Image (tube, rainbow, N blue to C red):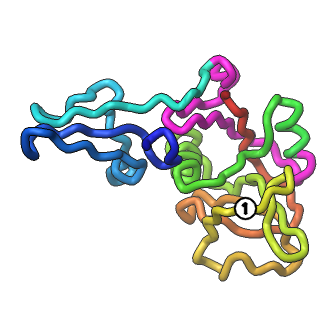
Amino acid sequence: MCMFEDTCLGFMFNTTRGTKGNCQLLSITQVLFQGEQADLENDPVVSQDIAYYPVQKGCLVPNCRVSEEYVFIEEICFCIKYYPIFLAYADASNFCNQDGGELARIDNLIKQIFATQLLIKTWLVTLDVTIQGFYNIEDWYFDDETRLNFYYWSTNGKQPNLNGEEYIFLRPTENGGWHDTSDYPRPFLCEITPM
């Protein structure tokens, strides 16, 4: 079951709840405690009666160029890099394409959490950062014209406000909240699909 759930990272097995034991799927919200990630990979035994088992979902590290400052998050098969270069949306998208990827496609809460944490804690970014997404007539789309089905709009400034603002940026100083924006040059996140 865990293989088919985007939010599932693994499962815990508890033998103290009866003779048959108890198995629980473990999601990202259970692994992140007050902004710190539990080290279940290196310390899989949580207690004498509880053990954690990660689920591998087919990610391939070689496709993520960590030697070129991309960060690979194996648990969710996510490979991203922050570029502090100020480019407009189309130029940033082309830059990512030439780098073998695309603008970061934040399509679920797990990617949102990891991208925001990396921006804040690893790259120490406080500037607004362009991510993939544009507005076209009545809805928001990714660059391949797939409709967005996940949103993380900021609660500050009544987002999205759609006053001629047709692109998305992530604001690390607002817990990664999204804002719609005009085509203003900003730093950006690129993503390479590691599969």
Residue 192, relative to residue 149: is it above or below? above
**Is 172 positioned to the left or the right of 136 in the image?**
left
Of the pair 18 and 164, the residue shown nearer to us: 18
- Amino acid on which the number 1 mark rests in the picture: Leu
Q: What stretch is highlighted in magenta?
A: 62-91
Of the pair 27 and 35, the residue shown nearer to us: 27
Residue 49, relative to residue 120: is it above or below? above
What residue sits right under mark 1 in the picture? 148
Q: Residue at x 28, y 46 (%)?
A: 24
Residue 82, relative to residue 177: is it above or below? above
- Which of the 4 image quarters holds residue 127? bottom right
**Is 1 positioned to the left or the right of 109 in the image?**
left
- Which of the 4 image quarters holds residue 185? bottom right
Q: Which residue is drawn at 22% across and 32% down?
A: 51
Relative image position of residue 178 (x, y in whole percent)? 66, 65
Where the N terminus falls, by quadrant? top left
Relative image position of residue 143 (x, y in whole percent)? 85, 52
Q: Is mark 1 on a helix, strand or loop?
A: loop
Relative image position of residue 161 (x, y in whole percent)? 76, 80
Of the pair 55 and 139, the residue shown nearer to us: 55
